[in-house]
Every structure is written in C-alpha cells, then in structure tokens.
Amino acid sequence: MASAGCMPAILLCRRPEASFSAALRERFRVLDFLASGEPLPTFLAAAAAAPEPPRAAVVTGGCSVRVDAWFLDAAPSIRCVVSTGAGVDHIDLAECARRGVAVGNSGDVYSTDVADYAVGLLLDVLRQLSAAGRYVRRGSWPVQGDYPLGSKLGGKRVGIIGLGNIGSRVAKRLEAFGCVIQYNSRKPKDSVPYKYFPNVHDLAVESDMLIVACALNKETRHIVNKNVLEALGKSGVIVNIGRGSNIDEEELVLALKEGKIAGAGLDVFEHEPKVPAELFSMDNVVLSRHIAVFTKESRSDLHAHTIGNLEAFFSGQPLLSPVQADSVVQ
C-alpha cells in the first residue's frame, strides 16, 4: 500500500460502510467530513488550505451536502464529483459543467435490483401480500375468514415515467407478465416498441398503474400531481422508486384517503426519513425505507464502481459512468 503522502486526496461527504471506508483508505487520502465533526464551511476551508488539496469528492443524495456554486467556491481544487447513487439532484450539473468539473454516478449498478423491487412493490400492492400476511399473523384468518382477493398483474396497462436504465428494465420484466407497456420521457425512444406519451396526464388516463422511475429535477418535481392522480382513477395504482418529490405527497395522501386511487407502493418520500403518518394504517399502501437500490451484491458492486470512477479520474481516463447536464433521464 502506498504511503499516505503519495496518495491523492479526496473529500468523503457520506457515511461509508466499514469495508468501503477501508477500500478507499487503501487508495486515497480520505478527508472525512462526517467523521471530522466540523461544520461544512470549516471542513472545506481546512481541506482547501492543505498543501495538496483534494481534487475529487464522493457524495450521496439525501444528505446535507449539496455540490453547488458555494461548495465549489469553498473547495476550488475539486475537479471531479462522484455520487454513490444514480440520482444527481444534489449536484448542480450546469455549474459543474461551467467549471469543468467531471461528474460521475453509480451508472447501472443498481438498475437491475431497483427494477426487481419496483415489480415486487407492484405485485405486493395488487395481490396484497404484506396486508394478507399481517392478517394471518394477527390470527384473523380462522376468526374472520378469507382475506379479500387482490387483482392480477397480467394484461394491465403500465405507464412508466422515465424510460432510462431502470425504467427500461422494469418494462422488460412487466412484458414477461403480459402487461401493456407505455411511457413518458423527455422525448420518444426509437429503440423501443412501447407507446409514447408526451405528457404524464395523458399517460395516466390510458394506464391502470404508473411506475415513477425518472430523475428529480425542476421539470420532474411533482410530475405526479393532483390532476395526474385523478386521471389515474379509482382503480389505479402508483409505484415510486424514483425520488419522493417526483410525487406531490400531500395530494397522494389525500387521494389514498379519499379512495381516488386504489393503492401505492412507495420506496421514497418527499421529506425522508419522515413518512406521512396517515399512510401507516392503509393496507393498500406498501412502504419501504428507500432501500430498492440495496442488495448485498449491489452494495459490493457500488463500492468497486465508485473506486473505479475515482481511479479513472486520477489516471486521466474517462469516468466509468459520466453524467452530463443534458443526459439525466426523465
């Protein structure tokens, strides 16, 4: 292992697992923001004043660190930002591009696992697996009889919002169930046979269920709003494995309470880790803690991919999964 003085310095702005931390420290001189206990301005000022200031930063979504003009002013030596998630709503891509700062993300490391999870959420809501399981565990089966029947998945019209790495994998899985796939994205994709809808409202009108798989940006914040939920209708189901703010959460809760849609499968929320308490008692809603991306295998793959992005940058090679300002999938 190289001595610390010979290692390139990086900023670490996320809480790493022990194995990931060890792997990073074998290759880089790690300046760990959360371990420092310092306010971010103080931490960045100290890093910038070092004899060999850091040239790369590792960040993640959903934390307090946003890579924007202020961050880049405070750490002017940073020339590469690597996010350990697919989403980059915590990074100002336009500002990074203006300053020549390379940006990388997790690429398609998570895509297969998230697509599997989306289908699992959908099946759970339709067939009421979690709710029926709770019914059995309470001892209600012998007392109250059979649990109400759920709905089949096969043959349903599924509208996918965002046909990128994840959305396209969701589509392939649901095709195997015999579903009719249609989608909304910024523009039609010539490589797929699915029907394209230029706006989400019209997609919802023609769908039995919606799956949100798009990035979060100014255009996609609350892309699912009151009008879209009403268009989806009383028998409609929505699944969100994108970002919580892709859906107007207040309107979603209201639609579920008033029976304006049939159910929801939610892995992400607008104000994480806070989840609307009204959802807890709804048996037609399946909840999880922003975990769709993580399996034992994907976590290990992510660590290797993040290190690969960093090593590519420090060796002057293209990043493994570069992100440009105009390449974020909707």
Image: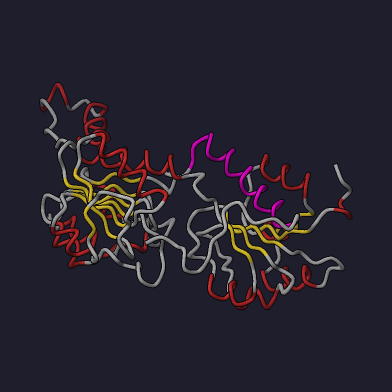
Looking at the image, which is closer to me, 66 or 33?
66
> Toward which corner of the image does residue 10 lie, by quadrant?
bottom right
Left/right of residue 28 with respect to residue 129 in the rendered view:
right
Which corner quadrant of the image does residue 58 belong to?
bottom right
Secondary structure mostly seen in the magenta stretch: helix
Residue 34: % across, % down: 66, 58
Q: Position of residue 65 (x, y in %)?
A: 58, 66
The quarter of the picture where the C terminus appears is: bottom left
**From what the image shows, is residue 298 above or below residue 168?**
above
Is 308 contained in the magenta span? yes
Give the number of marks: 0
- Residue 287 falls left or right of residue 324: left
What scheme was used to colour the molecule? secondary structure
The residue most toward the top is: 142
Which quadrant would the N terminus be assigned to in this image? top right
Across and down, in percent, residue 323 comes to 54, 61
Residue 269 shown left or right of residue 315 in the figure: left
Q: Residue pushed farthest front?
A: 190
Query: Is 268 contained in the magenta span?
Result: no
Q: Is residue 115 above or below residue 62?
A: above
Q: Which residue shows up at 26% across the image and 49% down it?
A: 193
- Depth order, front residue of 222/196: 196
Residue at x 64%, y 69% (from the top left corner): 101
Query: Over which residues does the magenta segment extend?
Result: 294-314
Q: Residue at x 26, y 63 (%)?
A: 224
Q: Position of residue 276 (x, y in %)?
A: 32, 57
